[in-house]
Amino acid sequence: MKIKIITVATVILLLVVMSVPVYAETTLPAPPSDAYEYWVYLLNGQVIVFATSHNPITTPKGPDEGETYILNGGKYYNYIDNEWILGYWDIGSIYISDCVIVAANHDIAYEDGSGFFFECPKVSPLIQGMEGTDYGTIWKTFSVGLIPIIGCLILVISLRKGWDFLQTQLTS
């Protein structure tokens, strides 16, 4: 019975007292309601661009040569002030340059059909960032939450030992 009470008290103390650092990824806004079947989110500086097309989106060059994306029979939107603003619509081809892909629902292919250079990320950017972080930084972040846990554990053990000592003194 004592162990259950101590466990509940420890959990309550941890939840109330301890602060835990939280990391979150930036979420992308929902696509416009009139998006076509192929789409891609691009980042142009600080502006989110949503490009959509009836046909798969392609590129004439590799990513090392400069990013240019071609929308055949498509349109693109800029996300400004929490709303999508139609940037351009054309029946022909639209060329969007100087952007970085954030997400897409299909692979971006080279225009000549020689292959793909983009696949949707299978690993979270948060995980990629943590893998590139110094090991000491990770331990420092982890220890922020570990120190209060160890302190509470020592407090609980001390209180239990003190209670047992007082109980034996009063009974004898």
Image: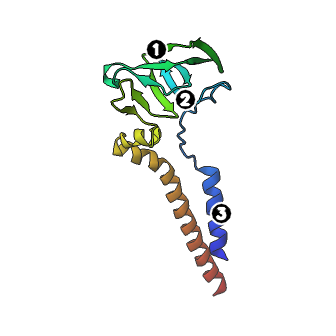
Which one is nearer the viewer's eye here, 172 or 92?
A: 92
Image quarter in which the C terminus is found: bottom right
Depth-wise, is mark 1 or mark 3 nearer the camera? 1
Secondary structure beneath label 1: strand
Which one is nearer the viewer's eye here, 131 or 11?
A: 131
Indicate the position of residue 171 as horizontal and vertical percent values. Answer: 66, 85
Q: Please name the residue shown 50% across and 59% down the image.
A: 150
**How many numbered marks, from 0 up?**
3
**Sequence-earlier tag: 2 or 3:** 3
> Where is mark 1, residue-wise?
95
> Where is mark 3, residue-wise?
9
Distance from disc 2 to disc 1, alpha carbons, whole Å, reads 16 Å
Mark 2 nearby-residue class (10 Å; few <14, some 14–19, many ≥20): some
> Where is mark 2, residue-wise?
38
Secondary structure beneath label 2: strand
Q: In the image, 63: left or right of 141?
A: left
Identify the amino acid type marked 2. Tyr
Depth-wise, is mark 2 or mark 3 nearer the camera? 2
Which one is nearer the viewer's eye here, 147 or 47?
A: 47
